[in-house]
Image (tube, grey):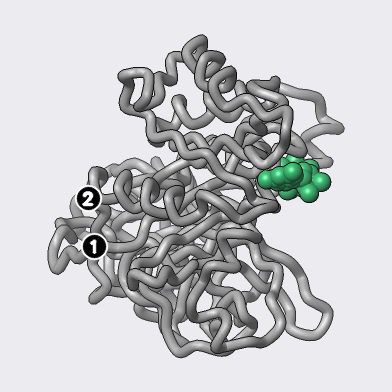
Amino acid sequence: PETITVQELSNRMAERATEVIKQLMKLGVMATINQTIDADTAEVVIQELGHTIKRVTDADVEMGMLGLEGNDEVNLIPRPPVVTIMGHVDHGKTSLLDAIRSTDVVRGEAGGITQHIGAYQVNLASGNKITFLDTPGHAAFTEMRLRGATVTDVVVLVVAADDGIMEQTIEAINHAKASQVPIIVAINKVDKPDSNPDRVKQELLQHELVVEDMGGDILCIEVSAKARTGLDKLEEAILLQAELLELKANPDRSAIGTVIESKLDKGRGSIATVLVQKGTLKVGDIFVTGNESGRVRALMNERGQQVDSAGPSLPVEVLGLNGTPNAGDDFVVVESEAKAREIAAYRGHRDRELAVAAAGRGSLEQMLAKL
Ligand code: GTP
Ligand code: MG
């Protein structure tokens, strides 16, 4: 059943909560400000107070709360592509990421200890930037996709030239296809004497991936993460693919992003790595993320350095969360703490309702466990 808290109902009517509570008392309903009432009761109260009823979907409510309704396709400027590297176990995903990271022109100057955060941006000598997501496997990618979080613009499919297409390669292809994300193939380990890139290209045909030299449109680059060859070509291919996608975002608005990973740090509390997708995130910003809220206390880049702000496609570690969100949760800057708390409470309430509804189909024990 649809419900609403007294607080929320009064907010939406711009009436004082005490006014709503008074009306409820007239109906014989004793409720405090944080209690929920059902939609039918709410309807009577709304009419009594001379307001009109407009029932909206959860999504509408959220968009309204978050201030995301309306056209925001303004001030669009190009943004760096966001890339996820996928492939079979041991085919060299981590090695390739490390090798690409070593081509970062800013990294050398800045020095410092490389933090292992789940996403980082590489600054190329050409002045271009590419953001890589270091997802710990397909599970994270799938989970994000199920949550409707589309953060990846391009998938780089790593296939070891001495091993060819394997089970997880096929899984990766299927994930990328299901999310309609273009694939670039990186045939890795070409330094190995038993490597056979042509065989890999043949095998790709069986999965409807026709590479360029075979008359198709799939970009395919031969690389060696170990010998560090082909990396510039791979980066070029990513940028070319990005150009075709015309990736753009408005940096001049409050930030919207997605949580890539999160953790609870003993000293610093909850920390989330957030990929900013629109707008610019700044220290001091108030936000909602999943069922949590907070105020940005500090932003850190992948080198562990504090930064004041982060624009589109830049991943940052965010400090100042009231709780730990989940990977794939949205991250939205809102205008006030009251708004942030209201949305977090609304979502928490909705999730509990969903849990109860789901439990209704299960046993009592399951229901109690979920509560
Ligand atoms: P998982 O994270 O376990 O799925 O593996 P991965 O895909 O990240 O592979 P990883 O980078 O750990 O590399 C696996 C092994 O292959 C390591 O022993 C690497 O040294 C080796 N390797 C990676 N790239 C190359 C390469 O280009 N050439 C050669 N010869 N070996 C490589
Ligand atoms: Mg790895």
Q: Sequence-wise, which precedes: disc 1 or disc 2?
A: 1
Q: Position of residue 22 (x, y in %)?
A: 42, 67
Q: Residue at x 44, y 58 (%)?
A: 24
Q: Position of residue 54 (x, y in %)?
A: 23, 46
Displayed quadrant of residue 348: bottom right
Q: Residues within 10 Å of mark 2 (few under 14, many from 20)?
A: few
Query: How many numbered circles does the render carry?
Result: 2
Q: Amino acid at mark 2?
A: Glu
Quadrant location of ligand 1?
Answer: top right
Q: Taking 218 as reference, is 246 left or right?
A: left
Toward the front, the furthest residue is 193
Q: CA distance from mark 1 to mark 2?
A: 7 Å
Residue assigned mark 2: 246
Numbered disc 1: secondary structure: strand
Which of the numbered marks, if any, corresponds to residue 78?
1
Quick check: marks 1 and 2 in contact, CB under 8 Å?
Answer: yes
Q: Residue at x 31, y 19 (%)?
A: 215
